[in-house]
Amino acid sequence: MNRINLPDVIPAAIDLSTVPRHVACVMDGNGRWAQAQGLPRTEGHAAGEDALFDAIEGAKEIGVQWFTVFAFSTENWKRPPEEVKFLMNFNESLLVRRSQELHEMGIRILFSGRKNWRVPKRVLRRMEEAVDLTKNNSEMTVTIAFNYGGRAEIIDAVKAMLEDGVTIERIDERKLARYLYEPAMPDVDLLIRTSGEHRLSNFLLWQVAYSELLFTETLWPDFRRADLYEAILEYQARDRRFGGLNR
């Protein structure tokens, strides 16, 4: 998808009856956005906050029920220590500053990822506070994939099944899905990745099995609800067959 000038209002061409139930975003390009402007990489992450909340507001406005974003991967620990420290502090600060705003919008906050591995306890506390604050909201669910890896999620699910004594003959797709980090999460209908990269990067590997994939050159800090609407228009133009044939 190429970036064009788009209005922030919902385009009349969008069919509101077939809006994707679950949209997921790989928010890529923060560092490149900052470097292109002669700024430290960390400034790109901070700039991405406006993009995130504009996209969330747009998703809620158009009727998306689940909106999941890739905030920090299990592989991101390999980044320079100062950037990892910034991201931990930034995400903690973001939760303090914006959880109440999401709560007032009727949005439920969830987190998906390894919560018992390397994440500072103070960040875990903020995550728990956000989940508890918003647990009864039903307008939309925003899931933040934090310390998340798709392969790690599947491995952790298998380990949990073994610990529960699940026998081989009882293991199938439905059983394994119950052991994922967020079992209630529906499959992803539309996956958007910004910044021109064309890969999944270990994101929601189980849930994106039949997703429509959309890649845009737009760097994440420049992404807005208008870009989301354009992505949904393209999604609605595709023929989703799930391995079968449409008649």
Image: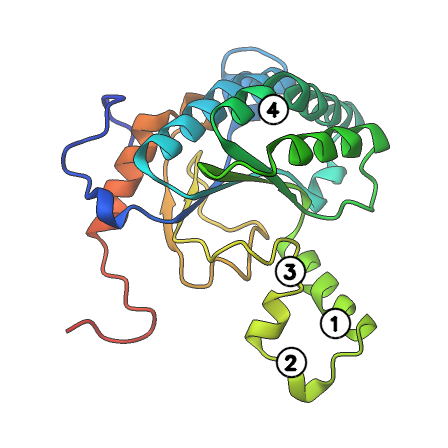
**For residue 180, which numbered disc appears in the image?**
3
Residue lying at 19% horizontally and 31% vertically, measured from the top left: 11
Q: Is mark 4 on a helix, strand or loop?
A: helix
Instruction: Locate residue 3, reporting x and y percent.
Output: 29, 29
Residues at marks 1 and 2 touching, judged by CB atoms closer than 8 Å: yes
Is disc 4 surrounded by few (<14), some (14 to 19) or many (20+) residues within 10 Å?
many
The disc labelled 1 sits on which kind of residue? Answer: Met
Kindly identify which residue carries mark 2.
171
Q: Which of 146 and 47 is in front in this view?
A: 146
Rounded to the nearest angstrom, the CA distance separating label 4 from label 2 is 38 Å
Rounded to the nearest angstrom, the CA distance separating label 3 from label 1 is 10 Å
- Badge 4 or badge 3: first in the primary sequence: 4
Depth-wise, is mark 1 or mark 4 nearer the camera? 4
Q: Is residue 28 visible?
A: no
- Badge 1 or badge 2: first in the primary sequence: 1
**For residue 161, which numbered disc appears in the image?**
1
Residue lying at 82% horizontally and 46% vertically, measured from the top left: 116
Rounded to the nearest angstrom, the CA distance separating label 3 from label 2 is 13 Å
Is disc 1 surrounded by few (<14), some (14 to 19) or many (20+) residues within 10 Å?
some
Depth-wise, is mark 4 or mark 3 nearer the camera? 4
Residues at marks 3 and 1 touching, judged by CB atoms closer than 8 Å: no
Q: Nearer the viewer, residue 72 or 96?
A: 96
